[in-house]
Image (cartoon, rainbow, N blue to C red):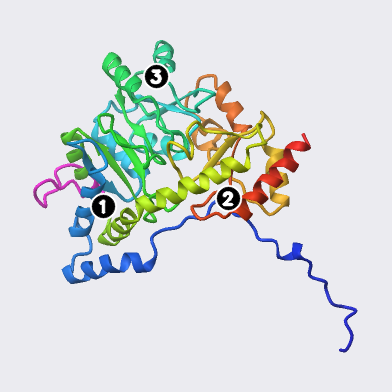
Amino acid sequence: MGGRSGAVRLTPEVFREIVPAARPRLPGADAVLPYLRRMDEARSYSNFGPLLTAFEARLAERFETGTRIVTCVNATQVLTLTLQALDLPADSFVIVPSYTFVATAHAVIAAGLKPWFVDVDIDDWMLQPDTVRAGLAAAPGPVSAVIPVAAFGAMPDLDGWKALRRDTGLAVILDGAAAFDQARQSDIPVVVSLHATKVLGIGEGGFLATGDEDLAARVRQLTTFGFRGSRAAQIVATNAKLSEYAGAVGLAALDNWDSDRLQYLRTSRLMRAAMTYLPEVRFQAGWGVDWVTSVCSVRLPDGTTDHVEQTLAAADIGTRRWWDQGCHTNTAFAGYPCDALPATERLGQSVIGLPFAIDMDERQISRISGALVTALAGL
């Protein structure tokens, strides 16, 4: 057994750290523990106990006066139940961008409605009010609502959507799943995700923010067996409440939000600085400067994502196509109508999610930018 002839020489490359596409961070156990102790003292664990009530109140403080908050088990359910609460005509169409996460379309179908996939703007990656106006005459059937999506956390033109609602009578709901940082207005109902991958995460959860008291009450009723003021089920509903445990994590997350936001800004700006000499890598307008989100989605030259993805993977750097090629390419939605989608198709071949986390360090960021230099030089 003596000798070293069979030993494997371990070079530094063997120990190269994998940089994952996402590495969420929720409040630590020490931050949540005081709230868990309060929960135990109250012996209240669900059914809108003091922690969840406090969490909803603190969320409401982030919005304009008069905003109602309705929490739910996840943002997809909130969106579904909000559509149901609006009592839209069954089987009517809801205009949605194809360039969004599949949850948007799933929610429409679960609400008994049909998605109509429409194209987005090539520059800000979002559905535009003028596109909806121009397309209504060619609608595949009766249209009852439209769901603009805040692309990866960027806020759309809310005034334009208010004008469209006023002029057309269409219901408008903002899918602001990733827009916790920017969501401040509730005149247009907005659904925000509290998933672990979001900037304010609790594991699973979501909420509706609306200035419409009746809408909030109807959505709340739908989350709690159809109860409203009594334990008699007045409507067919479900059980989609958040527990006190979720409220505890949410309160701890809000306690640290200001500090976390600064860390997201810091990491975002380090990413921007690292790409200074890579003009081919284009960030969303205002990303990491005016607003923060939990992902770093960048646009590369058209048709280059496959090559870049493969080059980074070879360097043990993860990437993610968060919205892939668009909802219309998913088998689940093959039977639903869609417009011509040239911008969506271009974005599907040019937008990629680079690794991003609140505590990503300069060494990891340097590896990412170096790998991008290699990938883009090979085009």
Q: Is residue 372 above or below residue 16?
A: above
Tag on residue 21? 2
Amino acid, disc 3? Pro
The x and y percentages for residue 98 are 49, 29
Q: Earlier in the sequence, mark 1 or mark 3?
A: 3
Residue numbers of the magenta segment:
223-239
Q: Secondary structure at mark 2?
A: loop
Q: Nearer the viewer, residue 90 or 155?
A: 155
Q: Residues within 10 Å of mark 2 (few under 14, many from 20)?
A: some
Residue at mark 1: 241
Q: Which of the 4 image quarters holds residue 279? A: top right
- Rendered position, 110 above or below 142: below
Q: Position of residue 78 (x, y in %)?
A: 31, 42
Q: Residue 352 at what x, y percent from top left?
A: 60, 39
Q: Amino acid at mark 1?
A: Lys
Q: Nearer the viewer, residue 165 or 257?
A: 257
Residue matched to label 3: 129
| Residue lying at 34% horizontally and 27% vertically, measured from the top left | 91
Q: CA distance from mark 2 to mark 1?
A: 31 Å
**Image quarter hosting the N terminus:** bottom right
In this picture, residue 46 sits left or right of residue 305? left
Amino acid carrying mark 2 in the image? Ala
Q: Quarter of the image containing the C terminus?
A: top right
Is the magenta region chiefly helix, strand or loop? loop
Indicate yes or no whether the magenta region holds residue 42. Answer: no
